[in-house]
Image: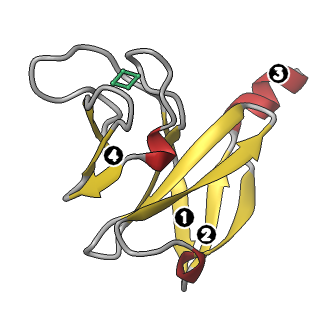
Amino acid sequence: MNWFAIGNIADIPLRGARCVKTPQGKIAVFRTAENEVFAIEDHCPHKGGPLSQGIVHAKAVTCPLHNWVISLETGTALGADEGAVKTIALKNDGGALFIALEDLMVAAE
Ligand code: FES
């Protein structure tokens, strides 16, 4: 697994997010009120809304376009909606954040 440094947790506001551009597409990195950090694709499973611009609450984000609620832990849509985004493994090493981009290795093979 390849770990890529994406900055420090302090760069992300509490209950906020950052969008990280990678060769795999845009990744949304969220920081919850409890100081947990999650990374998922920045592409709502409904119509591709930018989840990194959504509202973070508990361990979920509400899409800014039509209010689907996406779990940050599993990437799945909560409630009555169906769909999912990919979750990305994230490592928090004393505040330094790294995401795993496995598909890059697959693509290189
Ligand atoms: S694009 Fe996210 S709810 Fe419609």
**Ligand 1 under 8 Å from disc 1 Cβ:** no
For label 4, the crowd category at 10 Å Cα-Cα, with few meaning under 14, some 14 to 19 and many 20 or more, is: many
Residue pictured at 33% horizontal, 46% vertical = 72
CA–CA distance in space, label 3 to label 2: 23 Å
Name which quarter of the figure residue 101 lies in.
Answer: top right
- As drawn, the label of residue 68 is none
Q: Earlier in the sequence, mark 3 or mark 4?
A: 4
Q: Nearer the viewer, residue 91 or 46?
A: 46
The residue that mark 4 highlights is: 72
Q: Nearer the viewer, mark 3 or mark 4?
A: 4
The residue that mark 1 highlights is: 91
State if disc 1 and disc 4 touch (CB < 8 Å): no
Q: Secondary structure at mark 2?
A: strand
The residue that mark 3 highlights is: 107
Q: Earlier in the sequence, mark 1 or mark 2?
A: 1
Amino acid on which the number 1 mark rests in the picture: Lys
Residue pictured at 49% horizontal, 47% vertical = 52
CA–CA distance in space, label 4 to label 2: 16 Å
CA–CA distance in space, label 3 to label 4: 26 Å
